[in-house]
Amino acid sequence: MRIILVLLAVSGIPRVLIGQRWERQVQERVQRTIAAVGPSPRLPVVRRSGMLNTDETASFQTTLVQHTPYAIIAVCDDDCSRLQLTLLSPSGSDIAKERNSESLPTLHFTAATTAVYGIRVVMEGCRWNPCWYAIAVVPLRKPPS
Amino acid sequence: MSRVLALVLAVSLPASLLHGQDSLMAGLRRQADSLLTTWREAELLADVADSLEQVRATAGSDTIAVGGLRIIVNPSPLQWRDAAERAWPVIDSLYGSAAQDLPRYPYIFRAVDPDSGVRRTVLHVGAEVPWDLDLRATTTLLLTTVTPPSFDPALANWLGSALRPTLRPQDERGVVFVLLVTAPSEAVRRCFLGDIARCKDVLQIGDSTGLLTRWYMTPAEREALVTEAFTDYFARGATAPSLQRCRQHHDDACTALLQSLPPGTQPRPLAQAAGILLVREALRAGGRDAYRRLVARPSAPIGERLASAAGIDVDSLVARWRNGVLAARPKPLTLPWWASFVAIGWTAFFGLCALRSSRWRL
Amino acid sequence: MASLRRWVAVGLTACFLLALAYLPPRGAKSSGKSLFVGQSPQGTPVRQHARALADEWRNADATVRLLEDRQRVKRDSFRASPTIVFRGATLPPNAVHNVETVMDSLWRGLGFAETKVRVTLVIELRRPYNSDTPTPLQDRVAYLVPDSTHRTTCLAYLPAGPYWTLFILGKRHEGFDRFAPWLEAGLGPCAFYAAYGTPGRRVESWLLARHWDVGLYLGSHGIAGQRFSSLDLMGNPRSPWYWDGVYSFSPATVACLAGRPRGCSAAVLAGATEERTIPIPNVVLVERRWWRVQHLLPGERYLGDVARTVGRDRFLDFWTSGQPVDTALALALKRPVGEWTADWERGFVRPIRLGPTPPLGGVAIALAIAVFAIVVVAGTASRRQIR
Amino acid sequence: MIAMFRAVLYSQWKWSRLIVVLGTVAAFAIPLVSLQGAARPDRGALQAQELLRAVQSWGTLYPLLATALGLLMAIAAWAADHRGRHIHALTLPIERWRFVLLRFGAGFVLLAAPIAAVLIGSSLAVLTATLPPGLQAYPIALAVRFTFAVFVAYAVFFAVSAGTARTAGIILGVIAAVILVQVVASIANIDLNLFAAAQTVLLLGPGPLAVFAGRWMLVDV
């Protein structure tokens, strides 16, 4: 688990940017949001962060385990005004799209089967390019059945 | 399961980014390398093409040989041979024994119809001349375009031009005399009055350290130089206040401004004509091999080269140059014999016009 | 009357003959007579091809070097103000420190703190090159601006030339006051990236289409020191070559110099309609004589002045806008682009007079003098009237 | 009065018909020559810069022609009266100031021919030329300016010429004095530039002679 987090931290952003306030902003925000939604202790939280100019898109794939409720959340820095978050099926078609909640789009999803799903984020509004964003795929505690 | 996938994802992501970068750079480097190879081949081809063009341009042309002069020209009414026979003695007297090397630098001329309406083929080699030049103009052309044998950049830089025969040696001396008398520089004035060290300074053949203050010795000269020659240059930006101070007779400001000029832009107090005349004097003193000695050691200081060319020490050479210049004091303005007749003629003409004017008959 | 008709006929015939001689179709060809000018020798086609290849190689080589520098800097740079990399010679630490100090102070002067896009300045010091490669690019300023692979780095490549090389190496001490302006001008588009981030796709494509001629200088002074702009290179309006200089620019540029809003609008929006794909790597090569190929004079400071006038927020709206450039710019300026630019132009140069229209005041005074003269003559004559 | 005007007009036409006809032909020729080659079929339009340079240099002839016409017509208008000691004018049953206006009006009516020639010549020249994109022609503005210039020149020289030889002498004397002062000042190295001052006051800005100065561009941006 620790190895994964370290590698994730290495990925995406050039080292030179570490310590810049915009990146710190999104890391803190995503951390707080993860804590707020209450992650399951059994499964890891998949996190991605990076930067995009206005109208640019980033996407990645992750595996969602069947019958596990997930909260997929995205945050962005102060200069970002609108972020669009989309969950894609293994075949690439849209499952859910969130574009209304401006800089904090969130999707809730429970996979019927374990498969590799796609997540796409679109930077719809950024006043000072590039804008930093962070995404977290948070497995939630199963509701008591 | 999901841990393994996340691990794979995490590892593959930076790897793909770096791979993208490296492939882009590798592609560009490959492009640059292939361009470099193509350029090298193109250069070789271009050298061949140039030499072929040289042959093509001179094919069907006459080669006129007079003394060391070789003139490759297309058939035209121009009187090349006569012009060369006039030019050769003058060129030979300047370069002496080195003039025998001139066949290595042939003239290539293309005589063309001077009517600019006529379409001309593109010129790759040599120079174009209109085919209606008279003998005098053709001779002047040969004298002013001759390639000085083994002329090195150091000498060219000091002279400010190539060393070629002069058309009027006496006029050249007269010009330098006027320069010596009129140049707004105390150093030049002292040179005129016989201070050989100052002459070496203004001719730039001695020690070049701190030359500015030896060229422009008095604060007044430095101020005049800044405020007259470089006003526009210094009037803008951060130098403007210094210019103001210089205008208020602060010599430190004027000197600092002059020292801030880019290298080689500080104007010499004595124009290049003086240097050219000094070289001619050295060649005259040194005999037929003087020019060879002058160009023998391009890396040596100019003073030494002139001395070895002249075969005398540099001070004596400068003294000789100065005496030559003083001896060439231009004649005062004289009235040509016909001028008085012309004046009387015009007076008579206007007088008649005045007498016939209707105003007097009113 | 007969004589009148005869004279009129003579005049008309002369005019008719002139028209016949000078007007098309017969008069279409001019004699083309002019002074004889000898051609200067041109390189053979093969030589010209080799030169073209050398130029192509220079650009490719410069791009590769910029990419290499960008990677190297990415690893070791943590400076807030631009990282400075020297090429061509190893500098003593104090020389590097001196240049960095000047850069730090001018960076503060520009009001930059932490920026989203970081700037790296690559200063190429003049050095001799071996002859088996063409001379690398050393007479053109180039910029490697952020792209989708490096969104946060802008590299400025600044050839120092012999003068500044000597200065930086500490072999020349004069000219210090011109060094900071030289460095500031060298930042070029990178200063805009640092201040306002990456522009929106449309603005970036517009700027690429015109080689960033309106965004070469962000500072508020002149590009070559106090108040000096590319307009100063036009020379004195009374000099004979002034109008040759004016007419060497496009008609829109000239019309803008004359204070015509339509011309100004055309000059500013040149290239705005082209939809260009942003290349990777995105290299901006500034023309050797950029002041001769501007669409607007003094274009180099245009966007800087717009930003200062409208303020950061409105300028950012324009900079990142997804709307067409003309709309976005007009919204930021809150005025039609042409009108605002014509006023801006008047701030630098008195509108030049195009066409034959004389100054109105001059005509009025001239007519007044003429009428006065006639009245005086008539008055004098009437005083001599015998009654 | 109309009959009187016609008589004055006719007499003045007889004195100055050569000037009028030559002036008209010249006025018609200048625009044609200045745009010569602008419609060369092999080059379409001339290079804009080359064309504008040609138009600008030929344009200097318009003010010269206007001045020359004004001067010669003014001299011609009064020469006969001066020679006849104004006896003819005194015998006419008309106030003298009216007579002066008639003389002036008649001269100006005759000058309408060169003015019309400039308009027609420049219109013909630009209609048949192929102008580079971005350039436009100003035939009417040019003709209007030429009218102003002719009117001013004619009026001023008319006034001078109406005076006696003494008046002309005084004016010439003043000009000569200015030149003399300038020459002496230059010799004595006194910082006095009367010519530059005169140029600034008379030609530049809204000076009285600004209508003559500046560029007479038939074609421009």
Image (spheres, rainbow, N blue to C red):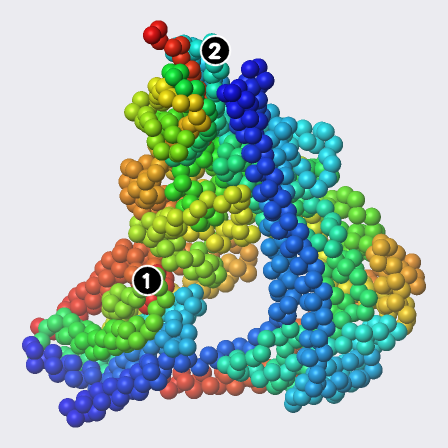
Residue at point 27% right, 69% down?
Answer: D139
**Residue bearing mark 2:** A42
Q: Where B294 falls versus B166 (above or below)?
A: above
Compared to residue C285, the image places residue C221 above or below, namely: above
Q: Amino acid at mark 2?
A: Arg
Q: Name the front one of labels 1 and 2.
A: 2
Of C302 and D41, nearer the camera is D41
Element on which disc 1 rests: loop
**Residue D200 at x, y percent in the picture:** 39, 56
Q: Quadrant of the C terminus of chain C?
A: bottom left
Residue A130 vertical position relative to residue D115 in the rendered view, above or below: above
In the rendered structure, are the residues bearing label 1 and label 2 in contact, judged by CB atoms less than 8 Å apart? Answer: no
Q: Quick one: label 1, few (<14), some, or many (20+) residues within 10 Å?
A: many
Q: Residue at x 30, y 52 (%)?
A: C262
Q: Amino acid at mark 1?
A: Gly
Residue B20 image position (x, y, % from top left): 56, 38
Q: Are marks 1 and 2 on the same chain?
A: no
Q: Is residue D73 left or right of residue B19?
A: left
Q: Which residue is mark 1?
A: C355
Q: Quadrant of residue B286?
A: bottom right
Residue C71 seen in the current view: yes
Give me the residue at 36% from left, 28% from top: A86
Q: Chain of mark 1?
A: C
Outermost bottom residue: C2
Give me the C-alpha separation between circle 1 and circle 2. Answer: 83 Å
Quadrant (top left/top right/bottom left/bottom right) for the N terminus of chain C: bottom left
User: How many residues crowd mark 2 within 10 Å: few (<14), some (14–19), many (20+)?
Assistant: few
Picture quadrant where residue B296 is located: bottom right
Please state the horizontal and vertical placement of residue B71, each as a whole percent of the image.
74, 81
